[in-house]
Every structure is written in C-alpha cells, then in structure tokens.
Image (spheres, helix red, strand yellow):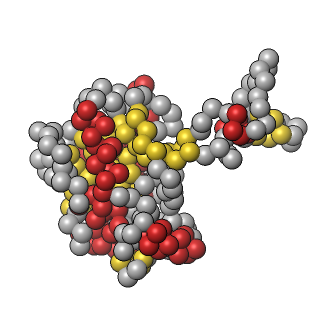
Amino acid sequence: MSTSLHISALLTGRGNNTLADKNVLPVFGKPLLSYPANAAKKVAGISSFYVSSDCEKILSAADGCGYTRILRPDALALPDAQHEDVINHALKVMREQGTNPDIMVVLLANTVTVKADWIETCINFLLENPELTAAVPVYREMDHHPFRAKKVDKSGLLEPFFDFSGKKVSTNRQDLEPSFFLCHNFWVLNLNTINREIGQAPWKFMGNKVKPFEVDEAFDVHTTDDLIKSEKWLVREGLV
C-alpha cells in the first residue's frame, strides 16, 4: 500500500459495560482489545494510532499497544452515547494535536474478529475509488432477513415491518434478495468525502456510498461465553 494520504486508527471502548471490564478481559492471556489494536498495527499504511475511552484500564492496555490516549468526556461514556459523537470528539483532539487524517480506521475494542488484511482491503477500496465514503465488513444473513422481521402493533399482534401490499414475498429464504449486516469490528471512513447530512441511517457518519467487504463471521464480546468463542475463532483462523 502506497499513498500520500494520512491514515489513522482509532480504537474505541468504554468502561461502563454489563460485562465488567470486558474490553480488557484476557483472551489467551492478552487483553481483548489488543487483538484489534495489533491487527491495525500490522497495516503498513496506517501512520497514527489513537484510543478513545473513559476507562484507565482500557487506556493503559491500548497504550501498551502503542496507541495515544484520548480521554473522552463522561457524557460519551454512557450506554446511550453515540459512536458518531465519540468519533467527532476524537477527531477534534487529534487535529488539535496536529494529526489530520484523510482516512480513519475505527476499531471496536470488544472483538477479536479483525484481520490486518481485512483492514488493508477496505482501505484499498477507498484509495481505488475516492468517491466512496466508507468501506466496512459485512456478513450475509438470510435466516434473519429483514423481510422476515415482525413488529407488534397497538393491539399486541404481529405485523410486518414493511408494507407488502400487492407484493408476493416468498417464505423461502433462498428466494429473497441477499441480506447483509454490518460487522461491529471495524469501519474505514473516508473523511474527505463523507457528508453526514445525507448518510445512511442509522450510521450516518459513514456517508451514503459505503462499499461492503463480505466476511464469513464476526461477533462482539458481551458474555464470558463469547470469550471462549473468541479463543476458538483465533485458533481456527490461525491467529494464535
């Protein structure tokens, strides 16, 4: 990868979680967050590394991986804090320190399912097509296809999320248009082209020209069982 653009990595994680200290819990003896942090470190094109958190344990563990600390305000450490606000705060701090990225790799601290070549592929998507606003990993999911989703109406009965009036919708998943969901492991943002005012909801900070990169599997850690699942994934993928 060769580019004159400045590419930064931003690792994000907060300390206030249902599973206490989940972002620094040991996975094969290393803090959970070290896996996404070190994956980004292996990408030659990334020249600056930052971590945004309210938690000293997270900041310290990321510091050990070579990430510069950004202490986020208490308001951005609440369960209802929005990732867009976290990113904007971090960007403000980075620019005040003289770092002005063109491309930002946003890493989530609570997953091991990140590979350096995945990050590099998504960065290359943006370098090859500067009109793109973001490139993100996705996984294909047909069992929980949006057309199969239901909501509860005012009378307490199920109804479709979509208006299918006059349309025939197959009950067979293989007949439906392929459905993809964002992985919550990392996102690569083109800060030069993103217009958040016209971005796709709910992740408007990604803009409206988002390139997918399909992977077989990605998952977050929310329970101790997920830590075991993480270790199995690392072994299966040959990353330990």
Q: State the image coordinates of residue 165 (x, y, percent, origin top left).
A: 79, 20
Of residue 187 and residue 13, the one placed in the foreground of this image is 187
> Which corner quadrant of the image does residue 191 belong to?
top left
> Which corner quadrant of the image does residue 52 belong to?
bottom left
Q: Is residue 66 above or below residue 81?
A: below
Q: State the image coordinates of residue 57 (x, y, percent, origin top left).
A: 34, 74
Q: Residue at (23%, 73%) from the top-left corner?
A: 64
Residue 11 seen anywhere in this rendered image of the structure: no
Question: From the image, which quarter does the C terminus lie in?
Answer: bottom left
Give the left or right position of residue 135, taking residue 104 as reference. Answer: right
Give the left or right position of residue 59, taking residue 22 as reference. Answer: left
Residue 165 seen anywhere in this rendered image of the structure: yes
Q: How many marks?
A: 0
Q: Residue at (63%, 32%) from the top-left corner?
A: 177
Q: State the image coordinates of residue 205 (x, y, percent, origin top left).
A: 39, 37
Q: Residue at (28%, 43%) from the top-left corner?
A: 123
Q: State the image coordinates of residue 48 (x, y, percent, origin top left).
A: 18, 54
Of residue 44 and residue 73, the one placed in the foreground of this image is 44
Of residue 81 and residue 121, the one placed in the foreground of this image is 121
Of residue 60 and residue 30, the one placed in the foreground of this image is 30
Q: Residue at (51%, 33%) from the top-left corner?
A: 201
